[in-house]
Structures are given as C-alpha cells and as structure tokens.
Amino acid sequence: MHSGIAILCVTYFIRGAAASAPAANVLLPASSAFVASACALLTFTSLPLVSATTADEDDYFDSFDNGDDIDDDHDDEYLLAPHSIFASDDTDTALLPTAAKIIHLNAEYSKEKAHERNLDNNVLAYITPWNNHGYDIAKYFRGKFTHLAPVWYQLKPDRRSPNQWLLTGDHDVDRGWIKEVTEPVQSDGEGDVIPKMVPRFMVADLTQEDLQGLATSEASFSNLNSLIIKECKKQNHDGFVFEFPYSAYTPHLVQHLSREAKEAGLEFFLVIPPTHGDGGREMFGREHFDAYKELVNGFSLMTYDFSSHQRRPGPNAPIGWVVDNIRRLVKDPKDAPKLLVGLNMYGNDYSSTSQDSVIGPNYIQLLRKYNPNLKWDRKVYEHSFLYTDESSGNIHEVWYPTIESIKSRVQVCNQLGVGISLWEIGQGLDYFYEVL
C-alpha cells in the first residue's frame, strides 16, 4: 500500500474541516419553491449547478497529477487520478492483464479466501432477478458482504386512490435463498458473520403531482412508508434500501421513514445520485448529507455511468471523479463510514451508432473473439480496448472493470474511510470478489 494515500486522506479531511464551520443538522424545508425545483427536474428543465464545496477546498485537487501522457479525449478535471496514490515508476507491466489472462483466470477464486474481507467498512451488494448469477455470488462470497440488497420491490402510485401507493415485486422474494445466504460463516478471524438482508424499494412511475404529494402530504408519504415497513416485518428483513431520486426535496418523508424504521428495528439505507460536473443541478449535496446523516444507516452513492450519462465514450467511473464526489459530501471523517461509494461490476460498449451495457459473459465473449490489446488509462484508472465489428465494420470502444481498477478503488475507499456498494454482483467476473 502506498504511503501517499494516507497523506492524501489527511490533507482531504484537514482542508475540508478547516474550510467552513459545521453545518447545522437541520432538515431542509419542503417549501413550495423547493418542491417546484424538484418538479422542474422531473420535466428535465435545465437548472444551474449548485456547489457544495467552498473556495478553500478547491485546492484539494492540487495533489492530482496532470501528466504529459494524457489522452486528449479525456481532459476534464474529473478524469485526473491522484498522483500520490497510484503513480509508480516501478510498475511491473508483466502483471497488467491481457485478454488471455482474463479468459484463463476470470472464473477462478480461492475457496479458502472466499470470505476474507479487504474492506474496512460496510459492503452492500445489489442482486437483480434478471442476472441470476448474483444469487450464487452472494452465497459463495457472503462473508465479504455486510449487507445484501436484492432488487425486488417497486412502489407505484395507485391511480384509483389519491395519496395511496401500491407495492409490487413481492413475488420475487426467495425465502430459500435468504436462508442460504444468511447462514453464519467464518470471516478472517472475525467470528461468525451473517450478512444483513436489506432489499431495495424503488419509487417508480412518478408524475409532478405524485412528487408534490410525497413532499407535502403526510397521507401520501405515510402510506408509502407503511408499505415498506410492513413488508420488511412480514419477511423478517433486517432493513431496506430506499431509492428515490428526489429525496433531497422530501425531508418530511425521509424523517418519517427514519422514525418508522427505528421503531421497527430496521436499518435504512438511502440511494443518492452523484454530481456529474456537466452543468446540471446537484441533486444531493453536503447540506442534504448533513441533514439526513443521523436519520439513515448509510447512503448508497451511485458513482458510475460517468461517460454514458454524458453520451460519450469513456470510463465508467474516473477515480478522480469518485474522490471528488466523496469530498463534496463528507466533511467530518467520523461521517465517512456512512457513505457507501458505488462500484460498477458492469461496463459499456460504445460505437458511432450505439452504446450497450457489457456484463461478464459478454466481456469474455468479446475477448475470445477479438483478442484485443487492453489499454490502461493512468488518469482514470480503468482499462479499455478497441475492436472492429466484423459484420458492420464499426469500431467499438469497450470499458469494463478489471482486477487492477477494482483494487485501486478498494484502496481509496479504505483510506478515505468509506464503504462500498456494488452494482451489481451478477454482472462481474467471479475473481473480482477476491479483492473485496
């Protein structure tokens, strides 16, 4: 482990703490103007970027290396990787991956180390019904995960009754699998480890009127919240993950849901969006983090889709951008463990006419078919490769995680004291999970 990481982290927290006085932990008001802004977002109205950092904190990136060997295509400040963390003149290029090595090793892992943890804080793993391999990964490596979040539930407005909601997805609940993955397992001398079951509940099919109701109507948000709590108690879940992109605009909902969860003995994780630095409004900033941090057990930060969000080929989650998203939210290092930084287990395949998601089996198929040369981008700490489609003649650019990219992010998260949330474990390669 490079000593430069510790220097970076100390610099980060000292500068952040000195930059401004602690913000009061007060819930933000659900004023009519505040809700109107959220409704405007719902109709894709462009709003100015709101910064959550101060001028004194802007020099944090002074420790980042601009380098002379930078790709002209990636000249954004968010693509700069911390030089003091990773730059090394003695990098053994023989250890860098090749297509042949990945094909040979991707399905192999040590059963003896399957439950040894390399992360210091919480690791929340999402599992989706449409990628069934995730159910197996959760069993094989369950000692590495503190929380398992199967993506089962949706909350939709009941169009027959005002301020009422419908819960769907309970048919996906697999009691047999839950029993298997919550069996105690020995993990790295820590004794018996039992992952906690915290399924995701996602709010879907919203209109402006629905959002207005969740922000201002107790009848609406109390009905929605009661469905979550009742289902968790019915299924004996340990808690839940709540995904709702406008949570910053609905403080009364979050406060009520927190109170209900605590009374029921349930853990509550809130999904929050990153900032992409593209001129769009910051939908969840430090003021929201500070207002909600005592109400939740953790925040699941969606730090992925950096390039696809901007509709351009490029890295999935430049490491400098990931660090910047941590920096803009966390001021006090004591709060860092509550932030679970998103780590993508999937990639993207770009061409002039398309952009498609890539998961493990597709990736291995591409490596077998084209035997490409993998390129390591030292600015973003991700691998990519090019290939030419045989049928169309189009050139494709593929970005997908590798052991090296994952190790670098695990290292940063440990040094900054944050946890990790994995989207999602059915999409990765089996040997990825050894480094977690």
Image: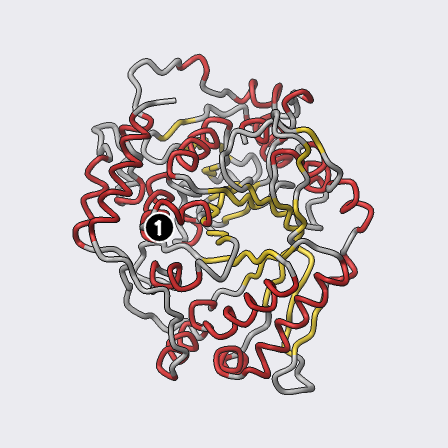
* Residue found at x 50% / y 25%: 372
Instruction: Give the side of residue 410 with respect to residue 166, left or right.
Output: left
- Residue occupying the point 38% across, 38% down: 416
Say which residue label 1 marks: 330
Residue at 73 percent of width and 42 percent of height: 182
Q: With 91 as the anchor, is 149 left or right in this view?
A: right
Question: Dividing the image into 4 quarters, which one contains the N terminus?
Answer: top left
- Apparent side of residue 241 relative to residue 211 in the rendered image (left or right): right
- Which residue is at the front of the view, 314 or 166? 166
> Judging from the image, what secondary structure is the residue with disc 1 in?
loop
Task: Please count the marks in the image.
Answer: 1
Q: Residue 282, position in %: x, y?
A: 35, 62
Asked which quadrant contains residue 276, the reply is bottom left
Residue 170, x across and y down, in percent: 75, 62
Q: Which quadrant, please, contains the C terminus?
A: top right
Dividing the picture into quadrants, the one containing residue 288 is: bottom left
Q: Position of residue 303 (x, y in %)?
A: 44, 48
Please, is residue 3 above or below residue 136 in the view?
Answer: above
